[in-house]
Image: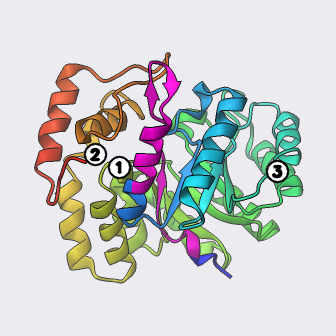
Amino acid sequence: MKQQKFRGTGVALVTPFQNKSIDYPALERIIEYVIEGGVDYIVSLGTTGEAITLTSQECREVLDFTIKTVARRVPIVAGFFGSNFTDALTTKIQNYNFDGIDAIMSSSPAYSKPSQEGIYQHYMAIEKVSPLPIIIYNVPGRTNSNVLPDTVLRLAHASEKFLAVKEASGDVTQAMKILKNRPEHLLVLSGDDPLTLPIIASGGDGVISVIANALPTQFSDMVRAALNDDYDTARRLNLDLLDVHPWLYAEGNPAGIKAAMSILGLCNNELRIPLTPVSDKIYQGLKQELSKVSGFVKA
């Protein structure tokens, strides 16, 4: 049985900073903004949240603050990005307090470029220790190893604990192969905002989004319309946002979305090294495109 609470729009929440420290008033402001904007759930400590630049203590504090602020109004997914050492990740999961968290999301190992069998065994090791449902995060642009459809399907058929795949290969055909052969419980979520509409039109269940940090109402409305088969509305909203997407990734994520959040007045345009803010050219181009979006209002 599909977990319906993870259909629709999940937002991969940014982590705001002020003078290199986590800006908790801004984080609270952003959480309220995206919930009021209509997102269906929040993903904390993902790629967009710059989790790899946070200490273990900071990660725990951000997650605890998010749980407290959300106050069960929407589900929360926590990112668990393992090292190349599977045992280290599973030990962390075994010893973690998951109170207030509804699911975990984990990408395949990076850098080591494991085989499909290695990826399968890695995720099955997570499945063995995780008390929560798991979202498989396939993002070969960062991990340098694609989780192929056969591997996703093998995992999903092996355990219903794998509730979803966040498919960020950039290949709609790959998503369709999963959709064609998936077990009933497996959700297929877009991991690339510009491909969300075609993936939903192919039978997908939603998205874990970057742009929903800045434009939660517009993007959530597009996703909701598509899931309700109102494709006239979905196409109109999608095209309204289409020219914003390239600016968000022109100099990498989360640099682009942090710039957008700064333009909106939601947080500072600050990242932690080795990530840096976008150039002024990109900032001004993004600002111009955002101003063209229907319903664009500074916070």
Tell which of 149 and 102 is nearer to you. Answer: 102
Name the residue type under label 1.
Answer: Ile
Considering only order in the chain, which callout, 2 or 1, is on the residue closer to the N terminus?
1
Task: Count neighbours of disc 2 (C-alpha within 10 A) and say few if under 14, some if 14 to 19, many if 20 or more.
Answer: some
- Quadrant where the N terminus sits is bottom right
The vertical placement of 199 against 91, above or below, is below
Question: In this image, 91 relative to 186: left or right?
Answer: right
Please tell me whether residue 12 belongs to the stretch shown in magenta. Answer: yes
Residue range of the region highlighted in magenta in the rendering: 5-32
The vertical placement of 288 against 138, above or below, is above
Discs 1, 2 touching: Cβ within 8 Å: yes
Task: Count neighbours of disc 3 (C-alpha within 10 A) and say few if under 14, some if 14 to 19, many if 20 or more.
Answer: many
Discs 3, 1 touching: Cβ within 8 Å: no
Judge depth for marks 1 and 2 and give the one in front: 1
- The colouring scheme, among rainbow, by chain, secondary structure or one colour, is rainbow
What residue sits right under mark 1 in the picture? 211
Residue 14 seen: no
What residue sits right under mark 2 in the picture? 245
Residue 50 seen: yes
The vertical placement of 173 against 53, above or below, is below
Name the residue type under label 2.
Answer: His
Judge depth for marks 3 and 1 and give the one in front: 1
Question: How far apart are the two marked residues, 3 and 1, measured between alpha carbons?
Answer: 29 Å
Numbered label attached to residue 126: 3
Considering only order in the chain, which callout, 3 or 2, is on the residue closer to the N terminus?
3
Q: How many marks?
A: 3
Tell which of 129 and 158 is nearer to you. Answer: 129
